[in-house]
Amino acid sequence: MPFSRRSTFSKAVLSFLMLGLSMLPATATAELEKLNDGELSEIDGAGIGLVLEDFIFSHGTDAPDVNGEQARIFRIAGIQSTDGREVDITVNHLYIAGSGSDYGTNLTPVNLGRLLNPWRIDVVDGNDIGITNKAVLEFAAPAMVDAAQGYDCLGGSAAAGSGTCSSRPATQDWQGERADMGMQMNVAVGDDRFANLNLHARSAVIDGSYLRLWGDDERRQMAGEFRLNFYSPELTINACSQDGTSCGSNIVMSDFVLQLALGNRLQPIYFDVDGSGNFLLEIDTIDAPGTGQIAANGQRAGSDAATWDFYNDYYSNPEFRSNVHIGDFSVGEKNFGSARVEGMLIQHLQIQTKDLAQ
């Protein structure tokens, strides 16, 4: 599995370590001292920043090696179809590499994150992000930046000042922070193995994506909000025979943009396990206003101000909504032009696993 990576901690963590080292005498040793609660409360940090430089990940294939062994299998099993047959899902050729990989056939390094804008793991004050009186665990991709400093999220040759993404496209002199990624997936039901499904994204960017998690005291469950921004100048999907000699028509989506919002500070997504051990993921229906809290004409004047502000924020905040933009959609030789779906608001969602053996 050929890949290389280097991790870089945030400046705050490095500064803390350097400060600690600078306090040690040059020729003497020092004892660790216990801190009381007051001293601990004054300690602050800025989380951990992560940058992967010269990164290549290539899963390869589950085909037997020269010794006849299958050492690189990424397989999901233990599933049954409705008629009782075993379902097997195998993933091959999963790769993350530099742009220009020609659908994963020519893998070169890519950087993931920048020292000025790394991937982050942090515990943030919920009061700063609208989640009152909570410590929030945040996993975040490189953040969006001001358009005067950032790069167009889709442009393969974008220049500084052309957009809000901090990840830079590759140039002749710089490998950039935008990765080609893809995989081949195959599903077998019993003895029936279907064609391979291939997915490839060119020069992909996920800047501005994050997962935030916190505890809900009232429900005694883990709550969260998930934001996925996915930008790619070309997303390709096709199906090929088992040996790869014949393939169906390519589905090509040019200038593909997905902005997916699951859960938010007013309507979080909940994670739970039910009494039978099945996993439950749920976005609850937003509570309806009480009688008389919203005026008959729907205006703030005459309504309960706090209730009106709550629903106005919920229905008008663009951060709570999901969008899909496709600059050009084609199947084989047929072109269907552009498409977009905007302003999708998930009002209720429930996903629950089931044990088919019961």
Image (spheres, helix red, strand yellow):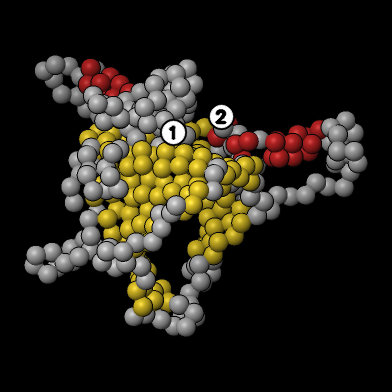
Residue that carries the numbered disc 2 in the rendered image: 128
Q: Where is residue 29 in the image (x, y as percent from the top left)?
A: 15, 24
The quarter of the picture where residue 44 lies is top left
Res 116 visible: yes
Location of residue 304 in the rendering, given as x and y in whole percent from the top left corner: 84, 36
Q: Residue furthest front?
A: 333
Please, which residue is most extreme toward the bottom here?
A: 83
Q: Is residue 273 left or right of 195 when viewed as pictured?
A: right
Q: Can residue 215 be seen in this view?
A: no
* Residue 213 x, y percent position in the rendering: 50, 44
Disc 2 residue type (three-letter) = Asp
Task: Please name which of the two marks, 1 or 2, marks the residue nearer to the observer.
Answer: 1
Q: What element carries label 1?
A: loop
The image's mark for residue 6 is: none
Q: Mark 1 points at which residue?
A: 154
Q: Is residue 86 above or below residue 41?
A: below
Mark 1 and mark 2: span between their CA atoms? 30 Å
Locate residue 37: give its quadrant: top left
Specify few, some or many for label 1: CA neighbours under 10 Å numbering under 14, 14-19, or 20 or more. Answer: many
Query: What residue sits 57% from the left and 44% below the top?
Result: 339
- The three-letter code of the residue at mark 1 reads Leu
Left or right of residue 241, residue 4 in this image: left
- Give the residue drawn at x 27%, y 42%: 101
Q: Position of residue 237 (x, y in %)?
A: 41, 54
Q: Nearer the viewer, residue 119 or 3?
A: 3
* Other residues around mark 2 within 10 Å, as few (<14) / some (14–19) / many (≥20): few
- Which of the two labelled residues, at mark 1 and mark 2, occupies the earlier sequence position? 2
Local secondary structure at mark 2: helix
**Residue beneath the point at 25% across and 21% down:** 18
**41 or 148, which lies in front?**
148
Up/down of 222 relative to 19, above or below? below
